[in-house]
């Protein structure tokens, strides 16, 4: 429920549990403090989370890493496209790009990290 006053609304960020009697007293108090108060029912959206102790791991694909190396998309745009957090993008760029560039330099490659080079890099890591 939203509590509206003078066209704006008060958002307590988290639900406040109260009995019907407590709710009536609360509304009465708010009316004395802010004037005309109206109530508006809203649907709460419950965010789905993994059961405690179980995390959902989204592995980086060769294509994902290729897009990290591409550099044409900002971290924000890439996070939306890959459905990952911006912090995750930053962290992976920080670790993967530096390691990949060092590997490519040792191999004598000059290309920016095309898909075939990334696949070769990841195959070497598995050995």
Image (cartoon, grey):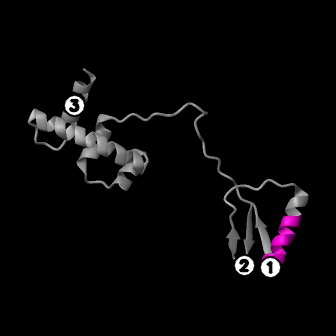
Q: Please give the name of the residue rendered at 84% of the width and 77% of the height, measured from the top-left corner.
A: 32
Q: Residues within 10 Å of mark 3 (few under 14, many from 20)?
A: some
Q: Which numbered marker is on residue 18? A: none
Location of mark 2 (residue): 6
Dominant secondary structure of the residues highlighted in magenta in the image: helix
Name the image quarter holding the N terminus: bottom right
- For the residues labelled 2 and 3, the Cα–Cα distance comes to 62 Å
- For the residues labelled 2 and 1, the Cα–Cα distance comes to 8 Å
Badge 2 marks a residue whose secondary structure is loop
Q: Residues within 10 Å of mark 2 (few under 14, many from 20)?
A: few
Quadrant position of residue 19: bottom right
| Front residue (pair 119, 30) | 30
Q: Please give the name of the residue rendered at 25% of the width and 51% of the height, measured from the top-left corner.
A: 71
Q: Return the x and y of residue 78 as percentages of the image width and height.
A: 35, 50
Q: Which residues are magenta?
A: 25-35
Q: Is residue 52 above or below residue 88?
A: above
Location of mark 3 (residue): 121
Say whether residue 30 is magenta.
Answer: yes
Q: Is residue 14 above or below residue 100?
A: below
Location of mark 1 (residue): 35
Direction from residue 97 to residue 38 in the image, left or right: right
Badge 3 marks a residue whose secondary structure is helix
Give the mark, 2 or 1, whose residue is nearer the N terminus.
2
């Amino acid at each position: 429920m939203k509590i509206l006053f003078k066209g704006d609304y008060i958002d307590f960020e988290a639900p406040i549990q109260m009995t019907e009697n407590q709710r009536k007293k609360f509304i009465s108090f708010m009316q004395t403090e802010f004037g005309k108060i109206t109530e508006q029912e809203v649907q709460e959206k419950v965010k789905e989370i993994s059961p405690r102790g179980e995390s959902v791991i989204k592995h980086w694909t060769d294509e994902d890493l290729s897009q990290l190396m591409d550099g044409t998309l900002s971290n924000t745009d890439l996070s939306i496209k890959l459905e990952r957090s911006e912090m995750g993008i930053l962290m992976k760029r920080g670790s993967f790009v530096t390691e990949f560039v060092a590997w490519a330099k040792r191999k004598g490659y000059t290309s920016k990290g095309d898909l075939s080079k990334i696949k070769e890099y990841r195959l070497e890591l598995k050995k």
